[in-house]
Structures are given as C-alpha cells and as structure tokens.
Amino acid sequence: MKESFRLGVRPWNLDRRPPPPPGREPSLRRPRRPGLRLPIPVCEPVLRGNELRYVKQCVRSGWISSVGPVVRRFEDDFARRLGVGQAVACSSGTAALHLMLRALGIGPGDEVIIPSFTMIAVCNSVLYVGARPVLVDCDPRSWNLDPADVERRITKRTKAIMAVHTYGRCAPLERLARLARRRGLLLIEDAAEALGGSYQGRPFGTWGKAAAFSFYANKVITTGEGGVVATESRALAARMRTLRDHGFSSDRHFWHKVVGYNYRMTSLQAAVGRAQLERFSALQEARHRNARLYRAALEGLPGLIFQEGHPGTVSSDWVFGFALGSEARIGRDALRAALARSGIETRSFFTPLHQQPVHLRLFEARRCPVSEALGAQGLYLPSSSALSRGEIEYVAERVRAEVLKARRR
C-alpha cells in the first residue's frame, strides 16, 4: 500500500470505540456561471429514448404489474446484451443479491467471502440468508478483492467468493476463478456497478455461477429501481423465479412449497429498461468519455490517487473518483464542501463494512487498511451520461483550484 494512502488514517478500532463518521453532506450552492447549469448533480438518469412510449404502451394495454410479456421481453433483451442464457429481473439490486444467494443454497453455517470496501447491501444480503460474511481487504491498485487475502480467509465453512466490481473495475477474475475451482467454492459476482465492463475480453457477470446487476437511477441504464440475476443455469433461474414470486407453485395458484419473497419487477419498470437497453452503447460511451476527460484534466495533480484496472480490464466507468493522498494537503470532506460551494455535488466513497455502526460487533476485530484509507480519503465526481464537456471542464477546474490552493497554504 502506498505511503500516501496510509498518512492521516488513524487505526480506529484499537480501543474498540466506533470510528468517526464521514462528514455531513455539504449544502449545494447555486453560483452563476454563464453557459453552465448549476448545481451539477452527482448523477442523473438520461431518459431520451423510447421510455415514455413503452410505458404508455403498458398503460394502454393494461400490462402494468409483473404479469404479462413485458418483463420477460426485458429479461430476454438483457440476456442477449450480456451474452448469457438466463436473466431473472427483480425489484432491486439488493433483491438480486438475496435471490442469488438463496437459490444457490447458501445459508446458516456457510461463509461467504466479500470485500470490506463495498456497499452495505453486499454484507446484508449474506446475513439475510443466515450465512456469515467474511471480510477481505482490497488491492490498492484496483480497489477490489485482494486474491491473496481471499485465500487466507478460506476455511472449511467457506461456500462462496463474491467478486464485487467496485466503481466498474474488477479483481483479477481469472485468478479468483482458478482459486474457487481448486478449493471447490462458488464464484459469484456483484456487477451492480459494472454493466458493460469486461476482463480479458469476457464481460463482467459471466465469470461466476451467477451475477447480480442493479438498475438504480444512477447506473448506466436504469429502471428507477430494479435488478437482475444473470446465469447460464436454467434450473437456478427457475428457482429464482419461484422465490421472487412468493414461492407460488407453477401448476396452481395460492399453493406454496417454499418461503418466497415479493421481489417482482413491474412491467412499467421493464418498459423503461427496454428503452434504456436500446441506447446502452451511447450511454456507456458517454461514461467512457467522462472518464477520459476527467483523467486528462486531473492527471498529474499532486496527491490524487486513481483507480487502476488490472491488465485486460475494460472498465464500465460507472463513476469517476479518486482518493486524496497526503500531497494534496486537503481532506476529502473539505474538498467536497468547497466543490459544493461551487455548485458541484459529489459523493464520499463507501465507509468499509467493518466500520459501519450497525456491524461493529460483527467485525470488531477486523482491520482492512486499504479499505479504511479509501473510505476516509475517497470521493467521486459528477458522472452522469448527460454531462456536457463544459460541465466536466468546470468540475475539473474547481478540483484543481482547490487542491493547488491548499498546497500554497
């Protein structure tokens, strides 16, 4: 781990007290800047295709619930886009994680290896099925699972390794796949932030037994809320379709042999998703352009540490962010506040799972230094596919100005 990553991050749990919380969300101002729409949101959906047309078709036809052809059509479109045999749509990315774990038979007594630096839904979904989440620190280059730490955490109770493709990049999936095969474990993927990315020419979401995706409003494509599980297994997909629909039996109504959930996607959501998939290439290319422009404008600025892909990685470039090393001489929360005064909305990086107040007792003895540094020092910038070149240039200009001002103090 780089020395600049370590500086300024105090070990928080040596005295078993909770870590300090991240700074409060700064208040956005609306400064006037000719030719710019301010404030600039951190992310917003782009709904400029057939979304309204397809939703109107649902309303006029009466197919607005999960029943009917629209959801299945969206599932088929998504499966073709990803290049897998089966896609099971559901109500959220978290529901997709839960369905995937439950359908795979993971439960009490099992352990699932996950990164500490990730969204809390990953940990919670493991707890939903009664299994034990085992935390792994991340690699300082990719900010994803460190395979060496993964191997150290495997026990006789380990059932699965969950590779989470944080911010659109991945861990070395080939190495994780070999490790899983050698140890007789399931490899599963949380690709919520990574649709459109790939590793060694193979799309994220096709490396493991199954993969969960999210269509929350800030993702490259959205259904408002929503998710999908992708898999090649017809049997696994059939189990998930039963579980997402209260466990209804296929041959008679109101007859239940398993405990299920109401995790269904509506036709209205699926209609939006179909229109989004039609424009996926353009929406994805806009995220790639954002990343190229930001990187070109900020490269070489002292103290900025960027996420890097392993060789063979094509990122989805879901969001563009960086961590602040000691050379920047400005803290993450101070930079966020300064940008907010300029009308720029940002987000702090994930607080690691072992530092979350709700899970302190569960992980009280765990230390993940890279995750802790990222959680304390990282932020991401406006990243919508709707951003203009002028907006990106303005954001980068304000970042440069604040970092350079801090260095002159």
Image (tube, grey):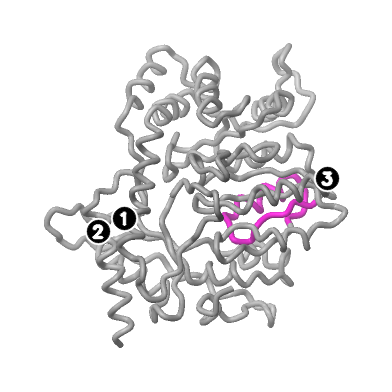
Q: Gap between marks 3 and 1, in whole Å?
A: 43 Å
Q: Which of these two is toward me, 66 or 35?
A: 35
Q: Secondary structure at mark 1?
A: helix
Q: Pointer 1: what residue?
A: 293
Q: Quadrant of the N terminus?
A: bottom right
10 Å crowding of disc 1: few (<14), some (14-19), many (20+): some
Left or right: 268 with respect to 199? Answer: left
Residue 297, position as x, y percentages in the image: 30, 62
Circles 2 and 3, Cβ within 8 Å, touching? The answer is: no
Amino acid type at mark 2: Glu
Q: Pointer 2: what residue?
A: 393
Amino acid type at mark 1: Leu
10 Å crowding of disc 3: few (<14), some (14-19), many (20+): few
- Look at the image and give the residue range highlighted in magenta: 111-133
Left or right: 92 with respect to 383? Answer: right
Residue 2, position as x, y percentages in the image: 55, 75
Left or right: 182 with respect to 196? Answer: right
Amino acid type at mark 3: Gly
Q: Pointer 3: what residue?
A: 184
Identified at 61% across, 45% down, the residue is 190
Task: Say which label, 3 or 1, has the lower sequence index.
Answer: 3
Q: Gap between marks 2 and 1, in whole Å?
A: 8 Å
